Image: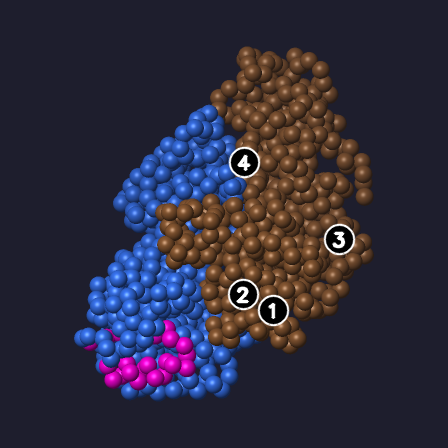
Chain colours: A brown, B blue
């Protein structure tokens, strides 16, 4: 592994000073959006707005040109019109700028010779001693250094293990928001747009090398050098999880790629088999991407395919069984010994103690659920526990039944008791536990449930338990997580896996 | 079609008086939950609680036995323990009760000879002049007559076109909540549990006959008479849409079915091809079921497979193209004439006017979107319009940019202007229009967005435009809707279809 790549990317991810060329006081201009975002997220280094008109923006002095800025500039953010970019890059070279991100569009993605020529021109400059991100991108988010992408003023300031690279800046803008409440934190998030210089291969190599990154994820529309990309993946197979959404796999999608970032889409079958061979977890949309990242951040390596599902109501047992089995997971019957221990606690009518354990109604008190959790903990055939909580019934219906509709929903919550039971189970048996809390209310008058939902989710999450909105989503994320455990244990550089999981899937 | 079935089901769906046998004052008992629900939803007829202990519940006199009740009883709801049910059914016969629902469990689903015998005993009584729903069910919800299922005290009081039958009562309880805010309304919703008498075949026949029902949906774990079920479907092919979730199609799911309602699951491949031949829209989960119903309620028959997608941000164009094409839908390029008319309104940089139309950022004002909507309206290759609105960016980010974070989100909403544009487009071109509003915030501090989301959704819905949370969900629902248009036009009793849609899919 080429460790010099860390050094080469240093100015892009960890600049001490930066210039925003095209800085603007008009709120809808890129040159204002990026400046505001970087000021608000709290970039600790020097910020030099540059605009020929001079003046002041957000309390910062505006320099009339890059040459005018005092001291060194490590990194330049360029938001001026496309025809002017080439000239400004030459200025950057003279100033000794080592890293640049070009937010401006109007290059290769135009699909005409003019755009292509402009992009070739700037790519040549990159070869003369600076690394360029973009053009047609939203930039870099790196909480550790205080950098953020174009509209990411309110992204989390906490750094974390996910390295994310994306050809779509809009997806980055969305990912930062979706990730925020889920505790998904980033080492770096890179929107690289057309990728005239820095692109998928370099970023992949960087993330495999970067010690801050433990999980790699990417949104790709095309790849600049397919054989190199696959080689990097194969050389690092099993070293870190790699989750990729390769878009533009259909004919129409491929056409859309051309006008989005000017890449070439490619065929779904070819990409699918190449990525599988290279040990990549392939996903097909933003929800699946986020859910899979979420599973990788919250599940321990011992999460295996033998799943116990418990809860009550909503055709849970049948639907859960179908969903899990379709994804190659298993819902084994409890062993006879465990079942015998469980029986005395439950009336035979209205309960099914086979796995999935359907306790007949959704208002199952935590103390009762705990007995099932212990049974699943003891049973050697069970690797992973899934506990279903339909909050609507537990909270709204319970409160209504007790005739206490003036009280806040949180007073009726099982969450404190259930969290204790989850913690006890984890401590005693060490098996991973996933919560599924479907949100079934849609009515405008019931938004207090959404508020309580997030409060409960935060409490479970803070204790390390992931919470999904549906069993289908939990099952898909779990199946991807388990696939990776197998990739890891199959790989020459893998660090071993869960032998039991592997045996039961082969 | 056997119209006598309407008569036979009259006492189950339109009783004038009912008895709740096993009525209870204890809030967690079935005999209290069902009584409360029926009182609260406002059943207009006579309600006779029956319990040997007598007394009063919810202001109603409790009768010590069914014989004691004054006047006729059309319908009895039975919540007493399983061993006592048979005897009470004999009493019902003597009293002249014509319809019964048995909420009690402890019958066939026990999986032992005792449970089987009990169920056979009660099924025999049904043959002697009464129709029985259940056992092991949650009952009937019929807003027109004021009946509701076990926990459905707050279901909508409005009647609508959906006839829904389900072996899972829990699913009915959930469906009522999910449907509520989406404006999905029911003619009847029937939880029939083990289905010892009334089951899938009868209910299917009823819903095909019932003039109040225009869309049929069902959750099945098994079917009591497969050949009859398929015959009814085939005889009525294309008459009304039929959307079925057949669960228990995997080995594990099939095992779970046995202990849930005691049915036999069956193989996925066999069911899949049989349902397809019979003209059924097959779905695989509650979200897909609801989304499909939603599409059938909001889309006009002219919704065809040529889709124009418009919006900005979030890798919209590429992802949308992939999703639509995978489902057999099309995203045709605009015709040259339409494209030429559109061009002058948009700067060439940062916009892609090919279809999908990606306007670069999510804050596209309604007046701009309207020009794209008109282009799509004029283009003969476009049948259906999808407009994407990422509310987080439009509301939160906009408000932040304008430095007005003390103002409520609704003040920054595009919804009033966009709704006007939607209405104008519909009026002028008559093409169906779908809104997609992804909810990308997860942070606990941002629940005001969820409130605003529902308010906007309600405004679009009230004007007849469906709103989905993701393009993938909209696309799947639309593809099911279009499949049905084809089924309808292929069927001998079909009322014709959209010939253009058909041609373009063949």
Q: Earlier in the sequence, mark 3 or mark 4?
A: 4
The residue beneath circle 1 is A331
Instruction: Look at the image and give the residue range highlighted in magenta.
Output: B72-95
Sequence-wise first label, 2 or 3: 3
Query: Label 3 marks which chain's residue?
Result: A
The answer to whether A249 appears left or right of B167 in the picture is: right
Count residues near mark 4 (Cα–Cα under 10 Å), then give few for <14, some for 14-19, many for 20+: many
To the question of a shared chain for discs 2 and 1, the answer is yes
Q: Left or right: where does residue B294 sit relative to residue A225?
A: left
**Nearest-to-viewer mark from 2 and 3:** 2
The disc at residue A278 is none
Is residue B83 within the magenta segment? yes
Measuring 32% from the left and 62% from the top, which residue is drawn there? B36
Name the image quarter holding residue B239.
Answer: bottom left
Question: In the rendered structure, which disc, 4 or 2, sits on the residue that comes first in sequence?
Answer: 4
Q: Pinpoint residue A47: horizontal percent, then vertical percent.
A: 63, 20
Task: Measure how far apart labels 4 and 2 are at the Cα level.
Answer: 47 Å
Image quadrant containing the N terminus of chain A: top right
| Residue furthest left in the image | B71
**What residue did someone put label 2 on?**
A320
Parent chain of label 1: A
Report helix, strand or loop for mark 4. Answer: helix
Q: Do circles 2 and 3 both sit on a common chain?
A: yes
Disc 2 versus disc 1: distance between alpha carbons? Answer: 9 Å
- Residue A19 vs residue B503: left or right? right
Asked if residue A281 shows in the view, the reply is no
Up-down relation of residue B176 to residue B425 (above or below): below
Of callouts 2 and 1, which one flags the residue occurring earlier in the amino acid sequence? 2
Instruction: Please tell me the numbered disc located at residue A110.
Output: 4
Q: Chain of mark 2?
A: A
């Amino acid at each position: 592994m080429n460790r010099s790549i860390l050094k080469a990317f240093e100015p892009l991810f960890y600049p001490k000073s930066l210039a925003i060329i095209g800085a603007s006081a008009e709120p809808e201009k890129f040159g204002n959006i990026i400046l505001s975002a970087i000021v608000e997220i709290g970039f600790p280094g020097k910020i030099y707005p540059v605009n020929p008109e001079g003046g002041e923006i957000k309390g910062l002095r505006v320099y009339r040109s890059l040459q005018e800025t005092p001291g060194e500039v490590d990194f330049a953010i360029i938001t001026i019109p496309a025809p002017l970019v080439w000239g400004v890059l030459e200025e950057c070279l003279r100033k000794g700028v080592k890293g640049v991100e070009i937010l401006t569009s109007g290059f290769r993605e135009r699909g005409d010779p003019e755009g292509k020529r402009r992009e070739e021109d700037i790519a040549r400059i990159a070869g003369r001693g600076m690394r360029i991100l973009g053009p047609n991108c939203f930039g870099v988010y790196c909480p550790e250094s205080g950098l953020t992408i174009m509209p990411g003023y309110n992204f989390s300031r906490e750094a974390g293990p996910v390295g994310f690279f994306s050809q779509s800046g809009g997806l980055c803008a969305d990912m930062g928001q979706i990730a925020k409440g889920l505790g998904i934190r980033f080492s770096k998030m890179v929107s690289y747009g057309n990728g005239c210089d820095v692109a998928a291969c370099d970023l992949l190599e960087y993330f495999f090398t970067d010690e801050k990154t433990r999980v790699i994820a990417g949104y790709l529309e095309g790849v600049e050098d397919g054989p190199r990309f696959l080689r990097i993946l194969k050389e690092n197979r099993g070293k870190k999880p790699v989750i990729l959404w390769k878009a533009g796999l259909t004919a129409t999608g491929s056409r859309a790629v051309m006008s989005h970032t000017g890449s070439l889409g490619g065929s779904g079958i070819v990409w699918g088999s190449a990525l599988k061979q290279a040990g990549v977890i392939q996903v097909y949309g933003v929800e699946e991407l986020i859910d899979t990242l979420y599973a990788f951040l919250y599940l321990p390596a011992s999460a295996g395919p033998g799943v116990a599902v418990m809860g009550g109501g909503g055709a849970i047992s049948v639907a859960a069984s179908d969903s899990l089995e379709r994804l190659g997971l298993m819902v084994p019957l409890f062993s006879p010994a465990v079942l015998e221990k469980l029986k005395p606690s439950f009336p035979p009518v209205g309960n099914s103690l086979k796995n999935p354990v359907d306790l007949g109604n959704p208002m199952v008190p935590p103390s009762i659920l705990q007995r099932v959790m212990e049974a699943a903990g003891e049973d050697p055939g069970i690797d992973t526990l899934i506990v279903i909580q339909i909050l609507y019934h537990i909270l709204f219906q319970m409160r209504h039944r007790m005739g206490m509709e003036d009280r806040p929903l949180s007073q009726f919550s099982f969450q404190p008791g259930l969290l204790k039971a989850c913690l006890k189970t984890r401590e005693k048996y060490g098996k991973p536990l996933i919560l599924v809390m479907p949100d079934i209310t849609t009515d405008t008058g019931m938004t207090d449930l959404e508020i309580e939902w997030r409060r409960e989710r935060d409490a479970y999450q803070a204790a390390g338990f992931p919470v999904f909105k549906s069993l289908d989503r939990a099952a898909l994320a779990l199946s991807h997580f388990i696939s990776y455990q197998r990739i890891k244990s199959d790989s020459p550089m893998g660090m071993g896996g869960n032998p039991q999981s592997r045996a039961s899937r082969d």
